[in-house]
Amino acid sequence: MRLAPLRRKDIARCVEIEKQLFAGDDPWSARAFHSELDAGNYYLGAYGEEGELIGYAGLATVGRPGEFESSVHTIGVEREHQGRGVGTALLRALLEKADELNAPVFLEVRTDNDRALELYARHGFGRIGLRKRYYQPSGADAYTMMRPARSAQEVG
């Protein structure tokens, strides 16, 4: 598996994975992915041995030097590749990017997504809030989580 910048030609595959993973909610459309790339957000693809997309992740950063904040917008890994370190590799790459800017990182995650909650806790995220009925149309709740800013020097 290798990580590389997400290619626009892989957006259709991202949408397929979204539908697989988030069928009970509102999976992202191709337009949403294009908008994220058009905005200059940091998106990575995880590519399998044959070059096929098996996962993706995106990070948005706002602010100015010394005041940056980052937000994990999405992480998705094809079901048959889950539990093999793909999500961990994607998250670590996003966090490295945020660390370059010394930015705290925020995200939302379903309260019933134990695997993701464990992953985020292992990487320094703590719960800072609860968003009732955040995911639609299912009405599932989400935790807002945050990992404090870390400089690349602190991490390295």
Image (cartoon, helix red, strand yellow):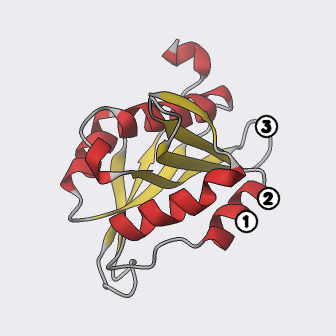
Residue type of the residue flagged with mark 1: Ser
Nearer the N terminus, badge 3 or badge 1? 1
Number of the label disc, if any, that sits on residue 35? 1
Residue type of the residue flagged with mark 2: Asp
Q: CA distance from mark 3 to mark 1?
A: 24 Å
Q: Residue most toward the front? A: 50
Q: Quick check: can you spot residue 6?
A: yes
Q: Quadrant of the N terminus?
A: top left
Q: CA distance from mark 3 to mark 2?
A: 22 Å
From the viewer's perspective, is the residue at label 3 or at label 2 nearer?
2
Could you say which quadrant of the image residue 38 lies in? bottom right
Residue closer to the observer: 121 or 86: 86
CB under 8 Å between callouts 1 and 2? yes
Decide if residue 56 is on the left or right side of residue 79.
right
Decide if residue 58 is on the left or right side of residue 145.
right
- Quickly name the residue at label 3: 65
- Residue shown at 44%/48% (left/top)? 146
> At numbered mark 1, what does the secondary structure look like: helix, strand or loop?
helix
Q: Quick check: can you spot residue 124?
A: no
- Quickly name the residue at label 2: 38
- Residue shown at 36%/51% (left/top)? 78
68 w.r.t. 135: above or below: above
